[in-house]
Amino acid sequence: MRRLAGLLFILASAAFSIAALSFGPAPNSRLLPEPQIASEQNLAVVVNLSNPVQNLSMPELRRIFLGERSHWPNGRRITLVMMESGQPERAVVLRDICQMNETDFNNHFLHGVFTGEVLVSPKTLATPVGVRKFVFNVPGAIGYLRVSDLDPSVKAVRIDERGPEDKGYRLHVPPRTSK
């Protein structure tokens, strides 16, 4: 009797699986919608929760990340935090925001600090957790994190009126590879 019940259960499960494949996921399925999967690979620009800035244009963001803008509208000094060289998140910021490679970016800051055009070099941290904690603790800080690394301790800023969850958002980072 047990064998028959087990066999009936297996057959019923297989029939349900085939039906699910034929008709797609159930309406209340826990599968993520397509745009949300894509947004997890977006790179959010983050600021301290006390920062009143909600939106930045790409040119404003570039000036901030190149050290050409030193203060927020409320007068607080901007403190830039970057991931270490070689990180895919940093490569996206250099390419899409700064429009430079690693060498040009480093030379820009060396020259800027030497001539006094840039007051301070970016703070460099190794991990997303480090960036998140730094931005949380420094009221004028700005950095970046993958959407999957966000939490309520920091605020994601909109870029050109688009948030990292929106279609048309411009900062995309490659998926993480397992090691």
Image (spheres, helix red, strand yellow):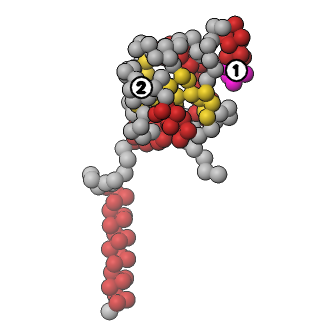
Residue 37 coordinates in the image, percent (x, y): 43, 42
Amino acid beneath label 1 = Asn
Against 45, is 69 above or below? above
Secondary-structure class at tag 2: strand
Against 4, is 79 above or below? above
Secondary-structure class at tag 1: helix
Q: Which residue is mark 2?
A: 157
Q: Is residue 172 left or right of residue 91?
A: left
- Please say whether residue 143 is visible from this viewpoint: yes
Q: Which residue is mark 1?
A: 106
Foreground: 69 or 163? 69
Against 69, is 156 above or below? below
Q: Is residue 1 left or right of residue 106?
A: left
Q: Main secondary structure of the magenta part?
A: helix
Q: Residue at x 59, y 40 (%)?
A: 127
- Please say whether residue 145 is visible from this viewpoint: no
**Magenta-span inclusion, residue 32:** no
Cα separation between marks 2 and 1 = 25 Å
Q: Is residue 165 left or right of residue 134?
A: left
**The N terminus is located in which quarter?**
bottom left
Amino acid beneath label 2 = Val
Magenta residues (range) = 101-106
Residue 76 coordinates in the image, percent (x, y): 46, 17
